[in-house]
Image (cartoon, rainbow, N blue to C red):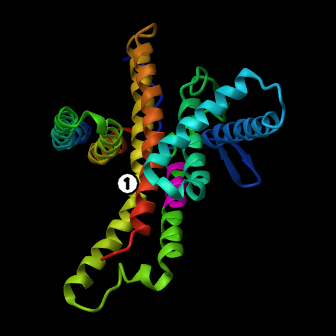
Amino acid sequence: MSAEVAKLFAVAITIALGVIAPSIAIGNIGAKAMESLGRNPEAESAIRTTMILAIAFAEAVAIYALVVSLILKFT
Amino acid sequence: MRESPHISIKPEQIYDLFGFSITNSYFAALIVIILFFFLAIYYSFQIKKTNKTNFFYFIHFTIRAIYNFFQNVVTDRIALLFPLLGALFFYILLLNWFGLLPGVGSILIREEYHFVPLLRGNTTDLNTTLALALTAFVSIQYYGMRDLGITRYLTKFFNFTNPISFFTGLLEVVSEFSKVLSFSFRLFGNIFAGEVLLVIIAFLMPILASFPFLLLETFVGLVQAIVFSMLTAVFILNATAKSH
């Protein structure tokens, strides 16, 4: 395997493995938010803001993987 | 082999002012700052007049919406914190959306023997996001020390009463510094990934295909501005909370 091919594999594997956990987490957060919205529809604004915050935290992990793979690809 | 699209992870220099390199993202930030300045002047000039323009009411409506939004988060401390949070929100929003305008990234100028874009969205530059993250970090520490007192605030991190609280204090220090990293990488990663996505889509299919992605990126820019300023608000609230 040449260095160029190894680099491409590294990029693909980094982003592919890096988004697994955040996607599960975001799905869970959305599901739980829907559930609590169904139980308590008056708390919609509070649920929305905390949901977006939690999604941003979970998404940050995927973004780290993305930044690493972008750096690998374009430098 | 076809020519690949031009993607660079760091901003390129477009002018050298006595050893201080003016990069393309810095130039875009200057334009946004001047725009922001004149908007603010216009708003404060119009607010004293009796016959106000429609544009004034538009700005007023936006600011009110953001004010109410933050009021839900920080409740009675809104008058103290809104200058910081609102400025962060509007500055990041304008920077993000400025990067999506046509011409940004596509107007090229000649720099010695290659072409570089004249403008580049400023939040796709890690220096800017790091500076914004440091601003947020310093203001979090400042408000924490102001509300709790310096010694009480520092006992959150350096507590020698028993071994367990000593180690949790060390973890707190690490998590405090990782805030800077996560703030700057979140903003940079989201906006830069959007920019790369738009370039790749426009490269694969030059007409019409990038339109839905432009809408998506507009939304992402708004969400990232909200997330950045709201995380600052939440961390300030955490820092000023009485520890127990």
Q: Mark 1 belongs to which subunit?
A: B
Q: Is residue B209 above or below residue B73?
A: above
Q: Residue at x 39, y 34 (%)?
A: B193
Which quarter of the picture shows residue B202?
A: top left
Nearer to us in this view, B186 or B203 = B186
Q: Residues within 10 Å of mark 1 (few under 14, many from 20)?
A: some
Q: Is residue B203 above or below residue A16?
A: above
Nearer to us in this view, A42 or B31 = A42
Q: Residue at x 44, y 36 (%)?
A: B191
| Span of residues in magenta | B128-136
Check residue B243 for magenta coloring: no
Is residue B114 visible to us here?
no
Side of A70 where B23 appears, left or right? right
Q: Is residue B173 above or below residue A51?
A: below
**Residue A9, x across and y down, in percent:** 20, 38
Side of A48 where B134 appears, left or right? right
SS class, disc 1: helix
Q: Quadrant of the N terminus of chain A?
A: top left
Q: Residue at x 53, y 64 (%)?
A: B139
Q: Which residue, given by chain and number where applicable, does mark 1 sit on?
A: B182
Side of B16 where B3 appears, left or right? left
**Residue A15, x across and y down, in percent:** 23, 39
- Most extreme residue toward the top is B207
**Residue A27, x across and y down, in percent:** 18, 35
- Most extreme residue toward the bottom is B161
Nearer to us in this view, B112 or B153 = B153
